[in-house]
Image (spheres, rainbow, N blue to C red):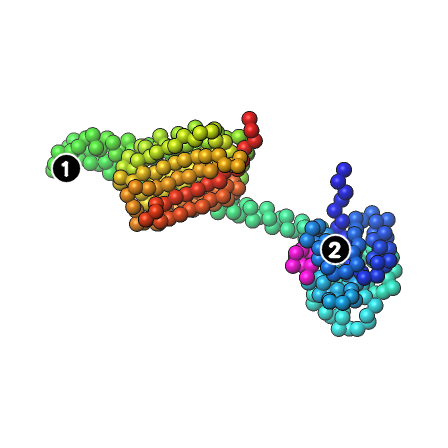
Amino acid sequence: MALPVPRILIVDDHADLADSVCELLALSGHSAAAVYNAEAAIAHCQNGHPDVAILDYRIGAGMNGIELLCALRQTLPDLIGILMTSDQDHDTAISSLRAGVLDYVRKPAEPQDILSAVEKALARADDLSRKGEELRKLGEEAEAADLNRSFLLSLGAEIREPLSLIMGNAELLAASVEGRSGRPADFSAIATDIRSGATALLDRVSLAKDLCGAGFDDVESERVAVMPLLRDLVRKLAFKAPAVRIELAEPSAAAHARTSKLHLRRMVHLFADGLLSIAVPGSALKITAETEGGKTLLRMSLVGVASPSTELSSSFGVAVALAHRLGIATAIRLDPALGHELTLVLPAAEPS
């Protein structure tokens, strides 16, 4: 069974005193460790995470206890300090308070004074930890709310585009039937545009339904086969962007990822939409997936006819935020000369 990580660090260049304080705390039920110089204290805090440091003011050559506490807080910002000193100087007390020392104990220290200071310091540490956890949860909730809001705003804007396409062609069709258009109608082209708009609209409605059924916080990881998801993406993109050639390269080995299938599907759709927003007719969107070191690398490359635009749709920003929440690394190259390319590093999946 692993030993508990010491919550209290005693730093004193008098080894006997440091060890006796450590023993006192251990007998009182606390976990503590003792070191005898500043260098050892710094190394200890880099490798462990004590909540409280009891520091001798005159620690030895180099720095005093207050200066050491400031140095330790470079690694552990919430470290609570207790100063042990025989110095009666008023300036020392003022300096310790300014440095954020919670309490100081006069030498020679009574055991009860040390225990009382430690209990107060641990109570402060627990309070800081609880408040830190509350702030972390609030931050996650705010991030999730922003992500939901951004996604819905993006979705609303993207729904209007295919809906306008449908409505516009429906009006054109009605005008042609009623003889109000003034010229013969190409009913085949109108039907194609309506079908393309309806497909895009249904796709976005499906994403909205997914969002309502499982919010961004409901990330349940599973072993996901990547290629079936990409084949489904290609089929939908072919209807959505008929002027862009969609190519999918089959990997030599099966590609899998450990993530949320629902959120991964949503994310790749949003990334593809973002790239297609800067595609020009005649260009090609090449999609590849390959396994490297247990992880799957997913690439989307927009090549062929150069597109001078690098203004991606708002869906791309939502996709980047979602990738961050899923722990998926992203790299994007926007270069009209070389082509635009997105690389995703999907979390490794355990072998089946």
Give the quarter of the image for residue 91. bottom right
**Residue 131 place in picture, x, y as percent:** 65, 51
Q: Amino acid at mark 2?
A: Val
Question: Which residue is painted at 25% across and 31% down in the image?
Answer: 192
Q: Nearer the viewer, residue 348 or 277?
A: 348
Name the image quarter holding the C terminus: top right
Q: Secondary structure at mark 1?
A: loop
**Residue 179 place in picture, x, y as percent:** 13, 34
**Residue 137 place in picture, x, y as percent:** 59, 46
Q: Which residue is mark 2?
A: 52
**Does any portion of residue 345 appear in the rendered image?**
yes
Q: Say few, some or many: other residues with alpha carbon within 10 Å of mark 2 (under 14 / 14 to 19 / 20 or more).
A: many
Q: CA distance from mark 1 to mark 2?
A: 82 Å
- Which stretch is magenta? 71-79
Q: Secondary structure at mark 2?
A: strand
In the rendered image, residue 100 lying in the magenta stretch gets the answer no
> For the residues carrying marks 1 and 2, which lies nearer the camera in this image?
2
Q: Is residue 200 left or right of residue 70?
A: left
Q: Are marks 1 and 2 in contact (CB under 8 Å)?
A: no
**Residue 264 place in picture, x, y as percent:** 47, 36
Q: Is residue 341 left or right of residue 75?
A: left
Label placed on residue 181 = 1
* Marked residue nearer the N-terminal end (1 or 2): 2
Question: Residue placed farthest to the left in the image?
Answer: 182
**Does any portion of residue 158 appear in the rendered image?**
no
Q: Amino acid at mark 1?
A: Ser
Question: Which residue is painted at 83% across and 68% down in the image?
Answer: 86
